[in-house]
Every structure is written in C-alpha cells, then in structure tokens.
Image: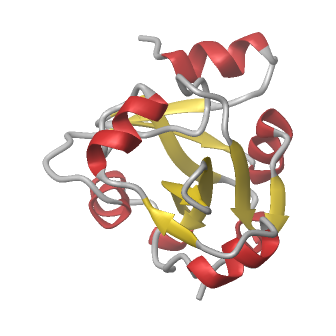
Amino acid sequence: MSTRAITYLRNKNIPFDVVKYHHQEKGAQFAARATGYPIEQTVKTLVVVLDRKRYALALLPGHLELNLKKLAAIASVKRAAMVDTKTAERLTGYLVGGISPFGTQQAMWTVMEESILENTQVLINAGQRGVMLKMGPGDIAAALECKVASIAG
C-alpha cells in the first residue's frame, strides 16, 4: 500500500512503519483509541491560513489545542485562522481525517509543537483515513524542514 505521503518519505529515505486501523470517525482521539497508541503521541495535522493570504500546517499532539495567537506571532503575521474542510482538502489533496503533512498538493510552511520531540516515536497520518505512520519526531521535522516551536495553548 502506498500514498503520496509514503512515497514522499521513501524518496527522502526517512524511516517509518505503517500502522493500519479501522477508520470510523476522524480525529486524533479516535485514531489513538483504534491503534491503542497514547493520544499524547498521536500527531494531528491542522491547516491554517496566515493573514488571509498564506497557508501553513500545524502539527500538534492529539490532546492539545492549537493557539492561533502563538502561531501568528511565530509566523510574524497579525492573525492565523483554521481553514474550512474544503480548503484543507484542496490544499493537501487528502481527505480530512487522513491529512498528512507529507506530499501535500501545495507545499506549505509547517510548524511542529515542540513537545512532540519529547517522544521517541509518534503516529502521524499517512495520507489516507485508517493509515498512520509510526516514526521518530526528529525524522518528521527533518523530512518537512519545519519550524519547531511552542504553538499549543
């Protein structure tokens, strides 16, 4: 099985394991329960708009909420807002509930919540509902060349 995210990681020689589960509802909470993996180590990918003109991805542990003010400050913009489902799916090329930060339709600046790096392994979406990637958070940061900062609130 392969997705654009898996192909992206293979092309960069980034190690990962595929973890499948029966997808019944979207969200990190359900994915964590279905895989038996701690919610604190299940990473969600959120799509945001910065100052109504630039899009970005925010990676957070499943149990934390994104602080849009912190994200805006880190991005040096006045405001950040979540995008709607249709926009998220158009920009990433993935369905909500399966959005991966890897291999998105449109390349986007990405910020990872710094506490993710406290884990040796995390689960992150593979670009398809019911398919996660188990990998090291340092490998995620390297593959995306993302900024690491405190964005949870």
Quarter-of-image position of residue 72: bottom right
Q: Looking at the picture, how far across and down is residue 61, in whole percent?
A: 56, 68
Nearest the viewer among 53 and 17 is: 53
Nearest the viewer among 54 and 104 is: 54
13 is higher (above) or lower (below) than 70: above
126 is higher (above) or lower (below) than 67: above
Question: What residue lies at 74% left-to-right and 69% top-to-bottom?
Answer: 77
User: How many callouts does the rendering have?
Assistant: 0
Quarter-of-image position of residue 148: bottom right
Q: How is the image coloured?
A: secondary structure
Question: What residue lies at 62% left-to-right and 50% top-to-bottom?
Answer: 56
What is the quadrant of the N terminus in the image? top left
Nearest the viewer among 60 and 151 is: 151
Q: Is residue 38 visible?
A: no
Q: Looking at the picture, how far across and down is residue 68, in whole percent?
A: 57, 77
116 is higher (above) or lower (below) than 65: above
Q: Looking at the picture, how far across and down is residue 70, in whole percent?
A: 70, 81
Question: What residue lies at 74% left-to-right and 47% top-to-bottom?
Answer: 136
Nearest the viewer among 65 and 106 is: 106
Quarter-of-image position of residue 23: top left
For this orientation, the residue located farthest to the left is: 24
Q: Is residue 116 left or right of residue 17?
A: right
What is the quadrant of the C terminus in the image? bottom right
Question: What residue lies at 61% left-to-right and 58% top-to-bottom?
Answer: 59
